[in-house]
Amino acid sequence: MCAAKGAPAGAGRQVILDSALRNMNQRGYHGTSMRDIARDADMTVASIYHHFKSKQEILQDIMTRALHDAIAMTRGALLRAGGAPGDQLQAVVRAWIMFHTTRQSDALVGATELRSLDYEGRRLVVALRDEQESVFRDIIDRGVEDGAFTTALPRDAARAIIHMGQSVCTWWRPDGPLKPEELADRYADLALAMVQPADNR
């Protein structure tokens, strides 16, 4: 479908991004052409260039928007979780899993297309990934300092938890046996076990 004539410019951009997401999930970034994106967006290639300078800019927009949204979800969960490191970690992991299930298409492109970014795009995305990692890392570091967590490998635990959650977008299916909320609860428990809470020592 195409944005209606006279619709806001943002509506046209979203139609293009939706088409690009579908195509990149099916064909990958390099297998997707601007013609593919234009066809599924029901517009001409020339029309796309009114909104984006290049296919590279579309990819960067998809990945940076997704990361901004993921950061907002995890930081929001952290703010609502209270002061206990264990509760904070589980809340952030639940939000992380919810993002990778409810925003699966965005997450899958983000997980597989870092290699396709140019230097500037990669710099932006890596900076956002580092910001996201710091949400997990800071919780775990505080938990270790407070004695709530006993892991001797806090940095490794943070990275393992992040990658464990990211992998969900590659295999979870809406018609599968687990709803996003159920999977989020499971992974929250796994993440807490990974940092070795003091109560279970």
Image (spheres, grey):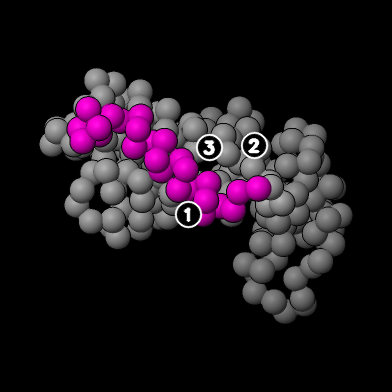
Location of residue 176 in the rendering, given as x and y in whole percent from the top left corner: 69, 47
Residue 133 visible at all: no
Q: Residue at x 23, y 44 (%)?
A: 85
Location of residue 178 in the rendering, given as x and y in whole percent from the top left corner: 61, 49
Q: Which residue is mark 2?
A: 170
Placement of the N terminus among the 4 image quadrants: bottom right
Q: Which residue is mark 3?
A: 166
- Judging depth in this view, the residue of 20 and 185 nearest the camera is 185
Q: Residue at x 84, y 47 (%)?
A: 36
Compared to residue 89, the image places residue 14 above or below, namely below
The residue mark sitting in front, 1 or 2, is 2
From mark 3 to mark 1, how far is it between C-alphas?
A: 14 Å
- Magenta part of the protein: which range? 177-201
Q: Which residue is mark 1?
A: 69
Q: Residue at x 28, y 49 (%)?
A: 87
**Dot 2 lies on which element?**
helix
